[in-house]
Image: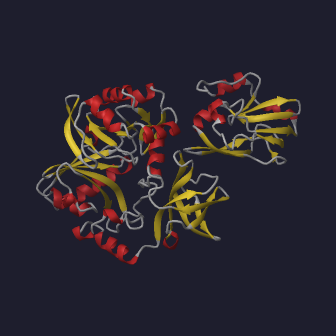
Amino acid sequence: MPNDPTEMRFSPLHEAHLASGAKMVLFSGWQMPVSFDGIKEEHIAVRTHAGLFDVSHMGQIEVEGPGALAFLQRLLTNDVALMEIGGAQYSCLLNDDAGVIDDLITYRLGGDRYLVVTNAGNHEADLIQFGKVARDFDVYVRDAASRYAMLAVQGPNARRIVAGQLRIELPPRMGVIPQQIGRRPALVCGTGYTGEDGVEIMLDPEIAPAIWAELVDAGVVPCGLGARDTLRLEVCFPLHGNDLSESIDPVTAGLGWACSEQTGFIGSDKVAVFRANGTDERLVPFEIEGDGIARGGNPVISGEETVGEVTSGTWSPSLENGIGFALIRSDLAEPGTAIEIDVRGKRRPARVSSKPLYSKKR
Amino acid sequence: MSEPSYPEDLRYHPEHDWARIEGDEATLGVTWYAQDSLGEVVFYEGPEVGSSVVKDEPYAEVESVKAVSDVVAPLSGEVIEVNPDLSDAPEAVNTDPYGTGWLIRIRLSDPAEADALMDSAAYSASLE
């Protein structure tokens, strides 16, 4: 039976978060920690050491059967056939007009067995689209969200600590290894949303609190969704709901690299046209020059004209200034272009940047 | 500071601001509760010396990583001093909200307005 989407959801780590004094926030219907000891400290812990995130709000959909590959090729924008067993791949899920229903990571667990990780706020919409398309394929689709807690351990020391503490086999970057954690089946994935090396672990909700505590004891710093947001923005990973939506296509969003039109996915005809002809707008990263922090919804100005809107804006703990994503007119999307952002009535000078805004080499 | 604290010598506004009244002048800032709710302050923009602030009206913005928040004046008056250290070290609002994290000093235009403010006990009770 489908879950009531208006119902408040709780992570299997909810009690542990409350006990640790985390500040909680409502995110896509889930009560999740926004910070433990402060967003800045947590952010820097991930960039320099290792941070631990509860991402149990993320959903999972299992896809299995002889038609699994053909089914996923129809749904997902990337070329799923390129993924080997034990591999992982980023994709968009589009509607008929090439609007982004969700952006997803798919793991190939076996010959015709895949697991797709969804954004919490889109899980139900994804299931509907998966279910609709599944009718035409010899495939079995199952909502597996309640079967997994999900932890992300991210940072330069993350892999070393996880391997030593949990005594598990580590996958390569963009790989997955099914194995046991706490004598229960688990998936250890070489993926993340911070720009740092690390792993994401999908595991039995019942043992999640013990594993969380073990990793914290081993020195991994608990981090909330606040730091997750500043980390992902510094490395220019879009967030669905802010930077991506059903009213934006992947070419506009700068995700053309994750689209293989020759596979014939839903929306591929539109994507091919956008790629060939260009789009009116582009999603670009920007950096504020000087004071001010742009926030989602702030107008982007060029000359005296409004030319776009900030979709995500925050203060970057690594760069120590305001950064974000903006959807702006394509002729202004070139990195280096000077723009202004209207931050609550004050014009703040900013510049379109190249991706990523932050990198270790910088 | 990590534990709540509401000094007895201050007067409090329900929008989580404090005033230290000394004769016809007052120093203003935000309370422990305000800075804790906001998180680490990374940017502060205050008014200019010589401008006026009006009781119950916003006069400054403090921004944390996550959000921006207006600072509301607990009393009316003319700005006679702004904390010069906050542009370089806005985190003082978190670490020392009643000391080095003060925001502005004003000359009161109507000292009687202070009668409407809460004392420490009343403000603490309002947070329960």
Viewer-nearest residue: A59 or A213: A213
Q: Position of residue A308 (x, y in %)?
A: 54, 66
Residue B26 locus on image (x, y percent): 82, 34
- Residue visible at 46% across and 55% down? A242
Q: In the rendered image, is residue A151 in sight? A: no
Left or right: residue A160 compared with residue B89: left
Q: Which residue is outermost to the bottom? A: A277
Residue occupying the point 36% across, 61% down:
A100
Looking at this view, is A31 or B62 the one in front? Answer: B62
Which color scheme does this rendered protein use? Answer: secondary structure
Q: Image height check: is A54 above or below A242?
A: above
Numbered marks: total: 0
Q: Nearer the viewer, residue A351 or B1?
A: A351
Q: Is residue A73 above or below residue A188?
A: below
| Spot occupied by residue A284 in the image (x, y as percentages of width and height) | 48, 62
Q: Position of residue A225 (x, y in %)?
A: 45, 41
Q: Could you tell me which quadrant the N terminus of chain B lies in?
A: top right
Viewed as shown, does residue A3 lie left or right of A86?
Answer: right
Single out the residue that lies furthest toward the front.
A361
* Quadrant in the picture for the C terminus of chain B: top right
Any part of residue A69 in sight: yes
Q: Quadrant of residue A261?
A: bottom left
Q: Quadrant of residue A288?
A: bottom right
For image coordinates 31% across by 41% down, the residue present is: A199
Residue farthest toward the left in the current orientation of the protein: A66
